[in-house]
Image: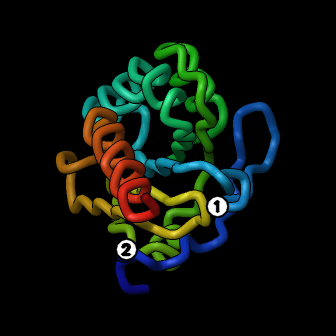
Protein backbone atom coordinates (compact mmCIF):
# COMPACT_ATOMS: atom_id res chain seq x y z
CA UNK A 1 0.00 0.00 0.00
CA UNK A 2 1.33 3.43 -0.83
CA UNK A 3 1.67 5.97 1.95
CA UNK A 4 -1.47 7.94 2.83
CA UNK A 5 -1.20 11.55 1.74
CA UNK A 6 -3.26 14.69 2.36
CA UNK A 7 -6.71 14.34 0.85
CA UNK A 8 -6.79 10.53 1.08
CA UNK A 9 -9.67 9.07 3.05
CA UNK A 10 -8.34 7.18 6.08
CA UNK A 11 -9.04 3.46 5.51
CA UNK A 12 -11.49 1.60 7.73
CA UNK A 13 -9.67 -0.06 10.64
CA UNK A 14 -11.30 -1.62 13.69
CA UNK A 15 -9.26 -1.57 16.87
CA UNK A 16 -9.81 -3.35 20.17
CA UNK A 17 -9.86 -1.11 23.22
CA UNK A 18 -8.89 -2.45 26.65
CA UNK A 19 -12.50 -2.23 27.84
CA UNK A 20 -13.43 -4.74 25.14
CA UNK A 21 -15.20 -2.24 22.93
CA UNK A 22 -14.36 -2.21 19.23
CA UNK A 23 -13.61 1.20 17.76
CA UNK A 24 -14.20 1.66 14.05
CA UNK A 25 -11.80 4.19 12.56
CA UNK A 26 -12.27 6.70 11.10
CA UNK A 27 -16.07 6.53 11.67
CA UNK A 28 -15.78 6.80 15.48
CA UNK A 29 -13.99 10.14 15.00
CA UNK A 30 -16.37 11.63 12.42
CA UNK A 31 -17.23 15.27 12.91
CA UNK A 32 -14.00 16.02 14.82
CA UNK A 33 -10.39 16.65 13.94
CA UNK A 34 -8.55 13.53 15.04
CA UNK A 35 -5.09 12.17 15.73
CA UNK A 36 -4.40 8.48 15.16
CA UNK A 37 -1.10 7.23 16.56
CA UNK A 38 0.49 3.86 15.83
CA UNK A 39 3.04 3.08 18.55
CA UNK A 40 5.86 0.59 18.56
CA UNK A 41 4.88 -0.76 21.98
CA UNK A 42 4.92 -0.04 25.70
CA UNK A 43 8.63 -0.92 25.83
CA UNK A 44 9.55 2.06 23.61
CA UNK A 45 10.64 5.15 25.61
CA UNK A 46 9.84 7.48 22.69
CA UNK A 47 6.31 6.07 22.41
CA UNK A 48 5.81 6.46 26.15
CA UNK A 49 6.95 10.08 25.96
CA UNK A 50 4.60 10.76 23.03
CA UNK A 51 1.60 9.24 24.80
CA UNK A 52 2.36 11.18 28.01
CA UNK A 53 2.64 14.39 25.99
CA UNK A 54 -0.75 13.85 24.32
CA UNK A 55 -2.30 13.14 27.74
CA UNK A 56 -0.70 16.29 29.25
CA UNK A 57 -2.14 18.36 26.38
CA UNK A 58 -5.56 16.68 26.48
CA UNK A 59 -7.32 19.81 27.77
CA UNK A 60 -5.89 21.99 24.98
CA UNK A 61 -6.76 19.37 22.35
CA UNK A 62 -10.28 18.94 23.79
CA UNK A 63 -10.69 22.71 23.54
CA UNK A 64 -9.92 22.42 19.82
CA UNK A 65 -12.33 19.44 19.52
CA UNK A 66 -9.50 17.04 18.66
CA UNK A 67 -9.95 13.34 19.42
CA UNK A 68 -6.88 11.14 19.99
CA UNK A 69 -6.63 7.37 19.49
CA UNK A 70 -3.53 5.20 19.79
CA UNK A 71 -2.79 1.56 19.07
CA UNK A 72 0.01 -0.98 19.03
CA UNK A 73 0.62 -4.70 18.71
CA UNK A 74 0.92 -5.05 22.50
CA UNK A 75 -1.49 -7.51 24.10
CA UNK A 76 -4.42 -6.37 26.22
CA UNK A 77 -2.74 -6.81 29.61
CA UNK A 78 0.37 -4.86 28.52
CA UNK A 79 -1.80 -2.10 27.07
CA UNK A 80 -3.91 -1.90 30.26
CA UNK A 81 -0.71 -1.48 32.28
CA UNK A 82 0.50 1.26 29.89
CA UNK A 83 -2.81 3.13 30.23
CA UNK A 84 -2.68 2.90 34.04
CA UNK A 85 1.01 3.90 34.24
CA UNK A 86 0.45 7.11 32.26
CA UNK A 87 -3.17 7.84 33.22
CA UNK A 88 -4.19 7.82 29.57
CA UNK A 89 -7.77 8.93 29.05
CA UNK A 90 -7.99 8.57 25.28
CA UNK A 91 -8.68 5.19 23.63
CA UNK A 92 -5.64 2.93 23.28
CA UNK A 93 -6.05 -0.13 21.10
CA UNK A 94 -4.23 -3.41 21.62
CA UNK A 95 -3.36 -6.54 19.65
CA UNK A 96 -3.20 -4.67 16.33
CA UNK A 97 -2.44 -6.74 13.24
CA UNK A 98 0.85 -5.18 12.11
CA UNK A 99 0.64 -6.54 8.57
CA UNK A 100 -2.96 -5.33 8.12
CA UNK A 101 -2.01 -1.83 9.36
CA UNK A 102 0.94 -1.72 6.96
CA UNK A 103 -1.25 -2.89 4.08
CA UNK A 104 -4.01 -0.35 4.85
CA UNK A 105 -1.86 2.69 5.63
CA UNK A 106 1.67 2.11 4.35
CA UNK A 107 3.08 2.10 7.91
CA UNK A 108 6.59 0.68 8.19
CA UNK A 109 7.11 -2.59 10.05
CA UNK A 110 9.87 -4.06 12.14
CA UNK A 111 10.07 -7.78 11.39
CA UNK A 112 11.72 -9.37 14.43
CA UNK A 113 10.07 -8.75 16.78
CA UNK A 114 7.05 -7.74 14.72
CA UNK A 115 5.65 -4.28 15.43
CA UNK A 116 4.50 -1.15 13.60
CA UNK A 117 6.93 1.77 13.50
CA UNK A 118 5.70 5.08 14.87
CA UNK A 119 3.11 6.50 12.50
CA UNK A 120 0.75 9.41 13.01
CA UNK A 121 -2.18 10.90 11.14
CA UNK A 122 -4.20 14.05 11.57
CA UNK A 123 -7.68 13.66 10.09
CA UNK A 124 -10.19 16.35 9.25
CA UNK A 125 -13.82 15.98 10.45
CA UNK A 126 -14.73 14.04 7.28
CA UNK A 127 -12.03 11.40 7.90
CA UNK A 128 -9.60 12.68 5.30
CA UNK A 129 -5.89 12.78 6.03
CA UNK A 130 -4.49 16.30 6.40
CA UNK A 131 -1.07 15.23 7.74
CA UNK A 132 0.69 11.87 7.74
CA UNK A 133 3.96 11.28 9.61
CA UNK A 134 5.78 8.03 8.90
CA UNK A 135 8.85 6.95 10.83
CA UNK A 136 11.15 4.12 9.87
CA UNK A 137 12.55 3.98 13.40
CA UNK A 138 12.22 5.23 16.96
CA UNK A 139 12.19 8.99 16.26
CA UNK A 140 10.14 11.25 14.01
CA UNK A 141 6.57 11.52 15.29
CA UNK A 142 3.64 13.86 15.87
CA UNK A 143 3.74 16.05 18.96
CA UNK A 144 0.64 17.67 20.51
CA UNK A 145 1.94 21.25 20.24
CA UNK A 146 2.32 20.89 16.47
CA UNK A 147 -1.11 19.25 16.17
CA UNK A 148 -2.81 22.06 18.14
CA UNK A 149 -1.06 24.80 16.18
CA UNK A 150 -1.80 23.17 12.84
CA UNK A 151 -5.50 22.67 13.60
CA UNK A 152 -5.79 26.27 14.82
CA UNK A 153 -4.20 27.36 11.53
CA UNK A 154 -6.61 25.24 9.49
CA UNK A 155 -9.62 26.63 11.34
CA UNK A 156 -8.46 30.25 11.01
CA UNK A 157 -7.66 29.73 7.32
CA UNK A 158 -11.09 28.17 6.70
CA UNK A 159 -12.80 31.04 8.56
CA UNK A 160 -10.91 33.61 6.48
CA UNK A 161 -11.98 31.89 3.25
CA UNK A 162 -15.66 31.97 4.23
CA UNK A 163 -15.56 35.59 5.42
- Residue farthest to the bottom, as pictured: 1
Q: Is residue 44 left or right of residue 23?
A: left
Question: Pointers 2 and 1 in contact (CB under 8 A)?
Answer: no
The residue at 36%/76% (across/down) is 5
Identify which residue, 98 or 149, lies in the foreground: 149
On screen, 27 above or below 142? Answer: below
Residue 154, position in %: x, y? 36, 54
| Mark 2 or mark 1, earlier in chain | 2
Task: Look at the image and tell me whether residue 44 can be seen.
Answer: no
Q: Quadrant of the C terminus?
A: bottom left
**In the rendering, at what x and y percent does residue 68 appear?**
53, 40
The crowding category of the residue bearing disc 1, from other C-alpha atoms within 10 Å (few below 14, some 14 to 19, many at least 20), is many
Q: Secondary structure at mark 2?
A: loop
Q: Residue at x 52, y 40 (%)?
A: 66
- Callout 1 secondary element: loop
The spot of residue 137 in percent (x, y) is: 20, 55
Q: Which residue is mark 2?
A: 6
Quarter of the view holding residue 25: bottom right
As drawn, is 159 to the left or to the right of 75?
Answer: left
Question: As drawn, is 82 to the left or to the right of 56?
Answer: right
The residue pinned by badge 1 equals: 26
Q: Quadrant of the N terminus?
A: bottom left
23 or 151: nearer the eye? 151
Image coordinates for residue 131, horizontal then vertical, percent: 34, 62
86 up-or-down from 30: above or below:
above
- What crowding class fits label 2: few (fewer than 14 Cα within 10 Å), some (14-19), or many (20 or more)? some
Per the rendering, the mark at residue 67 is none
Amino acid sequence: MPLLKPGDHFPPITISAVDGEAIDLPDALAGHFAVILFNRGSWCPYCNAQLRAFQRDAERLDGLDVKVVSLSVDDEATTAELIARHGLQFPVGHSADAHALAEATGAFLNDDPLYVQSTGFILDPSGRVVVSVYSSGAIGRLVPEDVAGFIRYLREHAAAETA
